Image (spheres, rainbow, N blue to C red):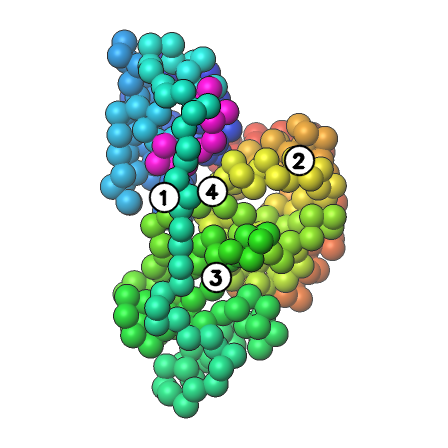
Amino acid sequence: MQNLKLLQLLESVLGKGKSTSGNNVAFFSPFTSHYKPKLEIDINTTSEGQNAWHCWISDKKGRSINSLFKQMNLGKQYFEQLSRIIKSAKYKNFDNEVKPVETISLPEEYIPLWKHKKTPDFRNAISYLKSRGVTIFDILKYRIGYCERGAYNGKIIVPSYDCTGQLNYFVSRAFYSADKYKHKNPKVSKDIIGFDLLINWEEPIVLCEGSFDAIAIKRNAIPLFGKIIQPQLQKKIIEKRVKDIYICLDADAIRNALSIAERFMGEGLNVYFIELKEQDASDLGFHRITEIIEQTGVMTFEQLMQLRMGILWK
């Protein structure tokens, strides 16, 4: 029998789940940016308080939700909620636990793209960015670079910095079409706030999936680095009482987008739901995505329910 309270907690963290076989529910994985829900969790809690889970892309797995939450580096409040749901499970006392600070650095081979070099890699990197509508101003603003050798050879590097100016994440994207590894990102927690250093929390924000989407949108855009909103970002939006939130996820993430919308609407915040049909924000480009944003009105609970029903009938 499915543990419905556990399912509600998981959906508050991972977004809306999709039932698969038996008692299993699939979610979009926080460990990968795969476009399909590949994190499968058994919602039937055993007598030992266990729920097996497995991410089929990263191959991360475990026997308990406790281990999943640890892998995601979630805060104390989520473990407390979990301990109230699964009584037989044992959890650490987090009051005296000092969580190690996760450090990250740019690849040693990182070269800033605003420093001109007369090499084929430099020219191809610039050409790739131009093809995606990235300007020299964007390169300077987001401190975009690239690598000519090493583990990130042939890849664009887009860093993200927290509000103190410390690096908290980066993404890479191959600028040669022949490269079979299009993405290569660091294996660290995504429970961070993308481009936090650049965000004005007094203004409307736009939530999107990736760095290139945020760069295309330009206006106060925060990449989720996936399809779910991480606890740290969710908490900050609520604490800052951000008045207007635009949700601009790809078409294949509509369930996740609606879950995010419902969460913030429940907090009394204005949500603007941007339903992308085929192309993502980075493909549409600045001018077209700006038009769509300006034409989008505040979402009502009636509209939210209509979209949810539409998904169910598909």
Q: Nearer the viewer, mark 1 or mark 2?
A: 2
- Looking at the rendered structure, the secondary structure element under dot 4 is loop
Decide if residue 168 is on the left or right side of residue 53.
Answer: right
Decide if residue 212 is on the left or right side of residue 287.
Answer: left
- Residue 224 lies, in percent from the top left, at 51, 48
- Say which residue appears at 54% left-offset and 48% top-offset: 193
Residue position for label 2: 239
Residue position for label 4: 191
> Label 4 neighbourhood size at 10 Å, few (<14), some (14-19), many (20+)?
many
- Looking at the rendered structure, the secondary structure element under dot 1 is loop
> Label 1 neighbourhood size at 10 Å, few (<14), some (14-19), many (20+)?
many
Q: Amino acid at mark 3?
A: Pro
What number is the disc on residue 31? 1
Inter-mark Cα distance, 2 to 4? 16 Å
> Label 2 neighbourhood size at 10 Å, few (<14), some (14-19), many (20+)?
few
- Say which residue appears at 37% left-offset and 21% top-offset: 92
Residue position for label 3: 159
- Looking at the rendered structure, the secondary structure element under dot 2 is helix
Mark with earlier residue (2, 4): 4
Q: Which residues are magenta?
A: 70-80
Identify which residue, 18 or 261, lies in the foreground: 261
